[in-house]
């Protein structure tokens, strides 16, 4: 997720508990969605769509935090 911001992500994971929680949940959802897509787990289409929407919402929130951090540090 957002690989071009590796340094900012590493810093925020250490300094911002909310960001760390968002990042961890995003990764959990990514792993679950990948498992469903690969056939290792099964969900109905509606549940899968819910997970994908939550993952996207978390990515958007994490991105907003990264941008605010970049503005704050210049």
Image: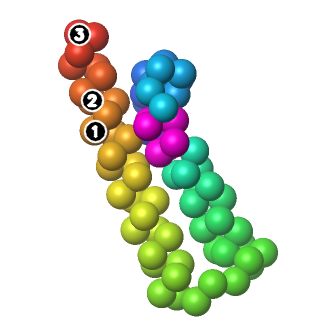
Q: Residue furthest right?
A: 40
Q: Residue furthest front?
A: 17
- Residue 22 is a magenta residue: yes
| Image spot of residue 7 (x, y percent) | 48, 19
Q: Residues within 10 Å of mark 3 (few under 14, many from 20)?
A: few
33 vs 58, nearest the viewer: 58
Sequence-earlier tag: 2 or 3: 2
| Magenta segment main secondary structure | helix
SS of the residue at dot 2? helix
SS of the residue at dot 3? loop
Q: State whether residue 12 is above or below residue 65.
A: above
| Image spot of residue 72 (x, y percent) | 23, 15
User: Residue tagged by mark 2?
Assistant: 67
SS of the residue at dot 1? helix
Residue 32 showing in the rendered view: yes
Mark 1 vs mark 3, CA separation in Å: 15 Å
The residue under the point 60% across, 67% down is 33
Q: Residues within 10 Å of mark 1 (few under 14, many from 20)?
A: few
Which disc number belongs to residue 22? none
Could you say which quadrant of the image residue 30 lies in? bottom right
Instruction: Give the magenta-colored segment's residue range.
Output: 18-23
| Image spot of residue 16 (x, y percent) | 44, 27
The residue under the point 38% across, 41% down is 62
The answer to whether residue 40 is left or right of residue 10 is right
The residue under the point 46% across, 78% down is 49
The residue under the point 21% across, 19% down is 71
User: Residue tagged by mark 3?
Assistant: 74
Mark 1 vs mark 2, CA separation in Å: 5 Å
């Amino acid at each position: 997720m957002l690989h071009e911001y590796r340094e900012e992500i590493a810093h925020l994971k250490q300094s911002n508990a909310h960001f760390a929680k968002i990042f961890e949940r995003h990764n959990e959802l990514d792993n679950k969605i990948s498992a469903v897509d690969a056939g290792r787990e099964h969900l109905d289409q509606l549940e899968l769509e819910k997970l994908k929407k939550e993952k996207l919402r978390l990515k958007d929130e994490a991105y907003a935090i990264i941008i605010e951090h970049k503005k704050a540090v210049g």
